[in-house]
């Protein structure tokens, strides 16, 4: 299991997030938003999903999360990362009928998401649940140990229904560093991932890498460009999520 790397701060509000650097705006996203393998690859595997893809069976994935999952920073659900993940997976697996359902609801804690697992995840009978969480817990100051316990209980509830799980941690932005402390929640999510052997998609570290490499600028894009910029970053997140899924299903 990959250890927590350089924990820092993340973006609290999706509408203030994911802004594209002007120098990359006209370039093809997949060529310019790669990430180091160690930020993509994790130890746990997704054997049920692997079997479904290998047998070209109808494959359903549910993404449950908060504002960024709901696509709060973009103009339509088609631009949110779950929709772009479906498009990317269908491109990579053209002979597999893949559906990615978006169950994002802004500003919910991990517990509030668990409370809607039955209608929003279990009722959909997916093979995989991608669980994006942590931002609202940090913003509200939920005890980090409680947050970790909720994650572990949520994983158990999904596995009781034979649903595989992948975690997605928070977004990165330097701007929130002096406002909200996210370190404990990143660490708690890593700990729950280790304990439950859940694949952890390191969105925080990937976005931090993009920022430090000058690929994206999350703070200094004109207001009129923000929704387009957000859609581009969501597309990059979707592509790297597809990389993670490919690795976990090898």
Image: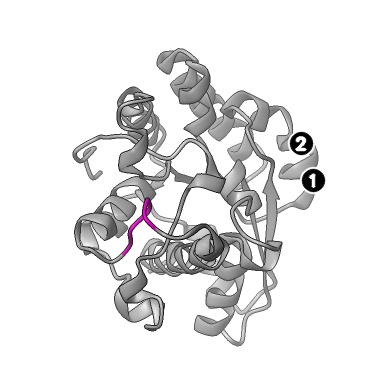
Please give the name of the residue rendered at 54% of the width and 68% of the height, measured from the top-left corner.
228
Location of residue 202 with respect to 31 vertically, above or below: above
Q: Which mark is residue 123?
A: 1
Q: Quadrant of the N terminus?
A: top left
Location of residue 2 with respect to 107 vertically, above or below: below
Give the farthest residue toward the bottom.
Answer: 95
Magenta range is 216-220
Quadrant hosting residue 84 = bottom right
Location of residue 29 with respect to 95 vertically, above or below: above
Q: Position of residue 204 (x, y in %)?
A: 35, 46
The answer to whether marks 2 and 1 mark residues whose Cβ atoms lie closer than 8 Å is: yes
In magenta segment, residue 219: yes
Q: For this view, does 68 lie left or right of residue 77?
A: left
In magenta segment, residue 56: no
Q: For this view, does 4 lie left or right of residue 181?
A: left
Q: Disc 1 on helix, strand or loop?
A: helix
Q: Quadrant of the C terminus?
A: bottom left
Q: How is the image coloured?
A: one colour
- Chief secondary structure of the magenta span? loop
Please give the name of the residue rendered at 28% of the width and 60% of the height, measured from the top-left corner.
210
Please give the name of the residue rendered at 63% of the width and 33% of the height, measured from the top-left corner.
107
Q: Nearer the viewer, residue 47 or 121?
A: 121
Q: Disc 2 on helix, strand or loop?
A: helix
Please give the name of the residue rendered at 52% of the width and 60% of the height, measured from the top-left corner.
226
**Crowd tier of the residue under label 2, counting other residues whose Cα lies within 10 Å: few below 14, some 14–19, many 20 or above:** some
Q: Position of residue 166 (x, y in %)?
A: 48, 48
Residue tagged 2: 118
Quadrant hosting residue 85 = bottom right
Q: Position of residue 52 (x, y in %)?
A: 59, 69
Instruction: Say whether disc 2 or disc 1 marks the residue closer to the N-terminus.
Output: 2
Location of residue 55 with respect to 226 vertically, above or below: below
Q: Which mark is residue 110?
A: none
């Amino acid at each position: 299991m990959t250890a927590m790397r350089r924990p820092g701060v993340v973006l609290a509000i999706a509408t203030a997030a994911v802004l594209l650097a002007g120098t990359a705006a006209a370039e093809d996203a997949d060529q310019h938003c790669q990430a180091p393998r160690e930020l993509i690859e994790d130890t746990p595997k997704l054997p049920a999903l692997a079997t479904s893809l290998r047998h070209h069976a109808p494959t359903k994935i549910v993404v449950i999360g908060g504002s960024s999952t709901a696509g709060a920073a973009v103009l339509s659900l088609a631009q949110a990362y779950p929709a772009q993940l479906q498009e990317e997976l269908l491109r990579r697996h053209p002979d597999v009928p893949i559906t990615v359902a978006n169950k994002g609801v802004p500003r919910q804690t991990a517990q509030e998401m668990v409370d809607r697992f039955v209608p929003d995840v279990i009722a959909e009978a997916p093979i995989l649940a991608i669980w994006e969480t942590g931002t609202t817990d940090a913003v509200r100051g939920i005890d980090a140990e409680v947050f970790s316990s909720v994650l572990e209980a949520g994983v158990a509830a999904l596995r009781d229904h034979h649903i595989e799980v992948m975690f997605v941690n928070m977004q990165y932005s330097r701007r929130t560093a002096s406002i909200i402390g996210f370190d404990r929640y990143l660490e708690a999510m890593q700990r729950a991932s280790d304990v439950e052997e859940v694949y952890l998609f390191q969105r925080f570290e990937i976005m931090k890498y993009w920022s430090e490499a000058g690929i994206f600028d999350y703070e200094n894009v004109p207001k009129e460009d923000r929704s387009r910029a957000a859609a581009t970053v969501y597309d990059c997140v979707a592509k790297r999520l597809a990389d993670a899924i490919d690795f976990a299903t090898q």
